[in-house]
Amino acid sequence: MKSVISIILIAIGLLPASKETKIYQFRGENRDGTFHETNLLKQWPADGPTLLWSCDGIGNGYGSPIVTDDRIFVDGEIDSVAYLFVLDLKGNLLWKKPYGAEWMKTCNGSRSAPTVVKDLVYLTSGMGDVACVKATTGDKVWSKNMVADLHGVNNAFGYAQSVLVDGDLAFCSPGGRDTNVVALNRFTGDLKWICPGLGQVEGFSSSRMIQKGKQKILLTFSEQALLGIDGKKGDLLWVHKMDTAGNVHANTPLFYGENIYYVAGDGNRGVKLKLSANGKEIAEVWRNRDFDNYMGGVIRTGNYLITTGARKPYLKCLDMNSGIITDSLKLGTGNVVFADGMVYLYNQKGLVYLIQEDGGKLSEISSFKVTLGTKEHFSHPFISNGILYLRHGKTLMAYSLRKV
């Protein structure tokens, strides 16, 4: 009887319904580069925020760390093998487990981030191994190879996508002529649907699921287009094609109000699309070819979008309504995230900047240099519980952002 009463109270809004399962994933809760943190420093000491710890044993790679309530998950490569490394929150390595073969041709090492859902972790290697493993041990639950099992075609730099999970489904983009994008049962790996898309190789993008009315829409890039796919059935709803050459579209699109925003380093570059009420049609509102970025992400601050330029190494701020760039700072090309009202830029020269946006104007507040680690500075920052996590090759660093 008590359970019946609870159901009735939930239905009429007097009791809260159960919360959705929390997913820890690439670029934060919604894959939009925003981390919902508070009480963070608004200015850093001259030599940067306090380095709490560093760990030098996470293998080669560029994949972002993913931080849960009590663990850190990160991919890395050792001797061409893809490993999942798991650390505690003090930077101590708890264990590592192999799950596939890693990319070794150009910028060898990991290029994706784990997706953690309760007791399961979803992984992608540069050679197309998709695996579901237990979060406590790394023991494999199931695995597929996007080329051998799903008839995909790898690209020039290796698969760089992070597995998307929504409900009971896990999504990946093999990039095959027929099996372009697929949905798998996330518990068994069984194939649930196939979308042929345009038959193009994938565009390095980590997909995103949005909802418009009753329609769930999977957003992902293939080689020459942004695809909108029915998230439940796999039907191709609409396509936004690139009108110029280029096949690197690694940034996950943003969704706000009725509109989709994306930034690419080539092709159409910065674009705003209006989504119809039923989610089955799009209309281009504006595009700005000077708002261009290959793989550093784009963030929203109020009515503005911020990214770094691919052709000119500037941090750029753009008005979401007009599509006009309102300000820029010459701080280099890199990866941007947002937390507690501030913009964080980790550029490809290893400099980390704290930026304030105010009415479309950008101000540099603080900066410091990353001196640990190896190879290129390509990894995306991750912020959790007042700590900034930066990966530079084999090294993971944790910096305190909390106000004292």
Image: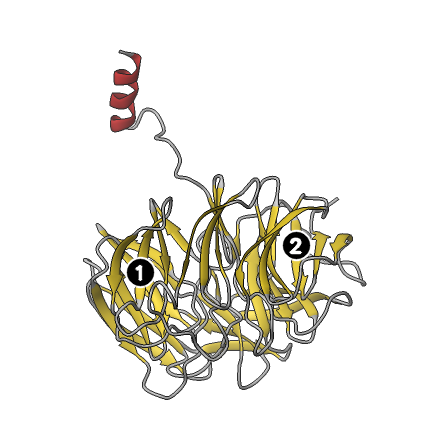
Looking at the image, residue 269 lies above or below residue 139: below
Hey, which quadrant is residue 222 in on the image? bottom left
Give whichever of 152, 66 is nearer the camera: 152
Q: Position of residue 171 (x, y in %)?
A: 36, 57
Residue 86 showing in the rendered view? no
Mark 2 or 1, closer to the camera: 1
Q: Residues within 10 Å of mark 1 (few under 14, many from 20)?
A: many
Q: Earlier in the sequence, mark 2 or mark 1?
A: 1
Residue at the top extreme? 1
Secondary structure beneath label 1: strand
Q: Identify the residue under disc 1.
A: 182
Q: Residue at x 46, y 83 (%)?
A: 290
Q: Where is residue 291 in the image (x, y as percent from the top left)?
A: 46, 79
Horizontal side of residue 223 vs 212, given as left or right: right
* Amino acid type, residue under disc 2 in the picture: Leu
The Cα–Cα distance between marks 2 and 1, rounded to whole angstroms, is: 33 Å
Hey, which quadrant is residue 379 in on the image? bottom right
Residue 292 showing in the rendered view? yes
Q: Where is residue 80 in the image (x, y as percent from the top left)?
A: 60, 67
Q: In which quarter of the image is the C terminus?
A: top right
Chosen colour scheme: secondary structure
Q: Residue at x 36, y 46 (%)?
A: 188
Looking at the image, residue 62 lies above or below residue 91: below
Q: Identify the residue under disc 2.
A: 388
